[in-house]
Image (spheres, rainbow, N blue to C red):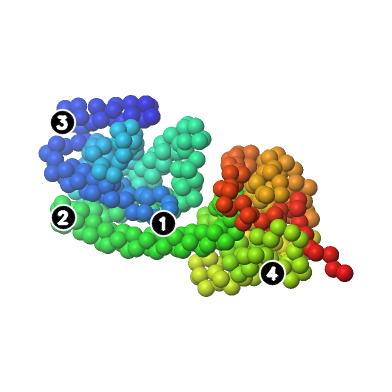
Amino acid sequence: MCVVVASAAAVLLYVLQADPDRDLDFAVPRTLLVLAVLFLICDSTPTALTSRQSAWSPSSSATLAAVVLLGPGGAALVGASSLFSLRRGGLRERVFNGAMYTVSAFAAGAAYVALGGRVGIPNPGWFPGDILPFAVAAAVHVAVNHGLLWGMLLLLPPARVNAQRGRLDLHLPLLLASDLGYATLGLLIAALWYLVGPFAAVLVLIPLFVARWAMGQFAAQQAAYAATMAALCQAVETKDFYTRGHSERVSRGATMLAREIAMGAERVEAIGFAGMLHDVGKLGVPTKVLQKTGPLTEEELAAIQLHPMRGLEIVRQIGFLNEALDGIMHHHERMDGKGYPMGLAGDEIPEFARVIAVADAFDSMTSTRSYRGARSVGEAVAELRKCAGRQFDPVLVDAFITALQRDGWRPSKTADVPPGFRAQIAAQDHDDPTAPLRVVESY
Ligand SMILES: [Fe+2]
């Protein structure tokens, strides 16, 4: 952080030196002011890309417009105005962001000028000659910005950044693409300046804000989906108390595993939903069967084994789940074909279902049950290894263990069950590979 701030301070000192030959012409303070205001408006109201992910602001359009209209020095000053952004939190975050934007804007400006880009209000004669320097400047801006941000995150202790990095990770391609897109708007502002002056900023801002409003609506819809899913999980966990938090942890484990095997961002998100809802079909299983402590009758076992189908029936109409439906339907299939409901074997089992099966069994084993204490992570890993090939996909078991070693695991705390709930805790768990469901002997 000190290096970034010191570099920014050096850039600003260099820019502000009263040397009339420098590329910042103080005869155009109005341009500077308009662009700084534009930057602050953009930076103060970021768009939520999706409900749960990071937000990115279109402020780079102002910075890149400054690169063309004012040169590297002016761009650095516009970037430095991030210090006064309404959105930023504490002083440290403000200072770091201000410094980061100063350095990246100056680097972009320097690249633009070095490649022969002309500084000032563009006229039609500048095009297409100045497009290439501008494109490089935009790429440099994005690269320096994200490079500094990532460098910072890599240096922080993992515990402090894991959540934030997870968010950035998931949407990095989207962030880079949107940032480059916003940077391109900078050229549009600069080009329009020739015709309408500072009003160019307003002309570009209006459609931008309409588009962002529409994206906000989309984000609100995503939030509604998430709330719906949380409500469904809550319903399952109310009915079957011992699985409290289980859906959430299976979702986390499945997401870890999906990232480890390099699934794309959209599939990672979908498998998170699938993990969340994998046991939603328990809503269709009689409560007394779920909570029965003794051996089950054939009919009761059949009722439990029907829960993946019931789950599919419940959520089939939810369009955005797509591939997640496969995960819900087949999460109890086994590699040797002895699972349920379809008895699929090996690669016939959808990948989502194979991933969820591993995370599901692992969480079940590391949680406390009324018939046994929680197993340690090491014991659960050994059990997964033992069942790899027969019950679980061995490649996925290995990948899950690697992910566990990297990210760690926070097991459940179901041990402290309130006394009133003790009677509601089942003495068996259909997810536990070490304690299969017991069935009454038939005579
Ligand atoms: Fe299940």
Distance CA(mark 2)–CA(mark 4): 68 Å
Q: Quadrant of residue 1?
A: top left
Residue marked by disc 1: 50
Q: Secondary structure at mark 2?
A: helix
Which of disc 3 and disc 1 is earlier in sequence?
Answer: 3
Residue marked by disc 2: 199
**x and y percent of residue 405 in the render?**
64, 39
Crowd class of label 4 (few under 14; some 14 to 19; many from 20; radius 10 Å):
some
Which of disc 3 and disc 2 is earlier in sequence?
Answer: 3
* Of labels 4 and 1, the one closer to you: 4
Q: Secondary structure at mark 1?
A: loop
Which of disc 4 and disc 2 is earlier in sequence?
Answer: 2
Which of disc 2 and disc 1 is earlier in sequence?
Answer: 1
**x and y percent of residue 112 in the render?**
32, 42
Q: Quadrant of residue 403?
A: top right
* Of labels 1 and 2, the one closer to you: 1
Q: Is residue 200 above or below residue 297?
A: above
User: Is residue 193 at least partly visible in the picture?
Assistant: yes
Crowd class of label 3 (few under 14; some 14 to 19; many from 20; radius 10 Å):
few
Crowd class of label 2 (few under 14; some 14 to 19; many from 20; radius 10 Å):
some
Q: Secondary structure at mark 3?
A: loop
Q: Amino acid at mark 2?
A: Phe
Which of disc 4 and disc 3 is earlier in sequence?
Answer: 3
Which of disc 1 and disc 4 is earlier in sequence?
Answer: 1
Residue under the point 29% across and 44% down:
87
Residue under the point 62% across and 65% down:
287
Q: Secondary structure at mark 4?
A: helix
Q: Is residue 298 above or below residue 74?
A: below
Label of residue 303 in the image: 4
* Of labels 2 and 3, the one closer to you: 2
Classify residue 353 as left or right of residue 276. Answer: right
Residue marked by disc 3: 20
